[in-house]
Image (cartoon, helix red, strand yellow):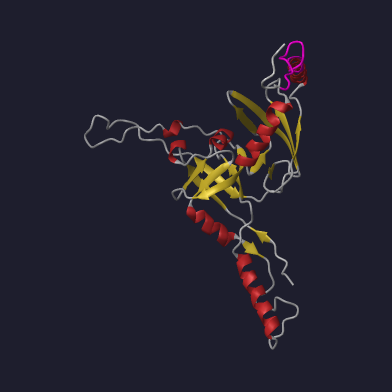
Amino acid sequence: MEANSTRSIKWSSQLAVLPTGQTVPLRGDKIILPPSTLEQLLSASTVTVPSADQPQTSSFDSYNPYSYAAERQARAQLVENRQELPHPLTFRLVNPVSGRVCYAGIREFSTEEGFVGLSPFLRASLGFDDSYAMATPKTLPNSSNASQTPNQPEPKLTIHFEALPKGTYVRLRPLEAGYDPEDWKALLEKHLRENFTTLTNREILTVTSGREEFRFLVDDLRPNDKAVTLVDTDLEVDIEPLNEEQARETLKHRALKAQQAPGTAQGSSPGGLVQIGLEVA
């Protein structure tokens, strides 16, 4: 009989934000945290389980070698569960200056202690820029640079561990008119699958295709209206125009595209089979 267990983690920290050039390239909603964070998360992970002094199998008999082996395996599994973290690991990020909030997934635990690495997407969402990274040259004693202003300190970011429910629904609103679902739907699905662990309400997603960019506002999420995780879930995606004017422009774009489709008066020829070796009349 398996022990019923519930896992909860309470963890938060405030770390300095690394400039973009001082972290590995990150995409989507990914962050990098120090190695000590992993140790802290494991220490903070608690599992509610029956006492280890009590039998973990209902048929345990100390004189029965078969039930003794099953009991030993159950206790080993109990110890393993105590050291297991939830998947995926998701975090709530707060810019303490602006108050902006967004959610993120973890890439790895490898930054220098006291620092966090953010993807460009997260930097923009949280309102950070790289102005503080414009380092002035280090001054030498008695040099002409002795009066230069010292480097600005890195901005701080408050990070909380927060488990999120699996997303079931998202409503997106295009930020420009003329989007056709055939142009962006496959790109959007691929972009989310490869780059995002979470979605945060009111954040802006940018999907690039060649020289084109498609931008979408996350306008509604379910079952949690703040944020959801995209891992191991079937997500229903609903696209609605931002306003009536945009809806009219989108309909015009679709109508023009239909008129220029192959086989139409304004489009190219529909094409057909090419038979090699036959004389063309």
Q: Quadrant of the N terminus?
A: bottom right
Start and end of the magenta stretch? Answer: 258-273
Q: Quadrant of residue 85?
A: bottom right
Dominant secondary structure (helix, strand or loop) of the stretch shown in magenta: loop
Q: Tell me residue 181's x, y (percent).
A: 73, 27
Q: Is residue 165 above or below residue 243?
A: below
Q: Tell me residue 23's x, y (percent).
A: 46, 41
Q: Tell me residue 83's x, y (percent).
A: 59, 64
The answer to whether residue 19 is left or right of residue 67 is left
Q: Tell me residue 47's x, y (percent).
A: 65, 64
- Closer to the camera in the image, 225 or 256: 256
Q: Is residue 264 above or below residue 135?
A: above
Magenta region includes residue 264: yes
Asked if residue 192 shows in the view, the reply is yes
Asked if residue 53 shows in the view, the reply is no
- Closer to the camera in the image, 217 or 98: 217
- Closer to the camera in the image, 252 or 169: 252
The answer to whether residue 153 is left or right of residue 52 is left
Q: Quadrant of residue 51?
A: bottom right
- Residue name at image x 56 percent, y 33 percent: 124
- Residue name at image x 59 percent, y 43 percent: 93
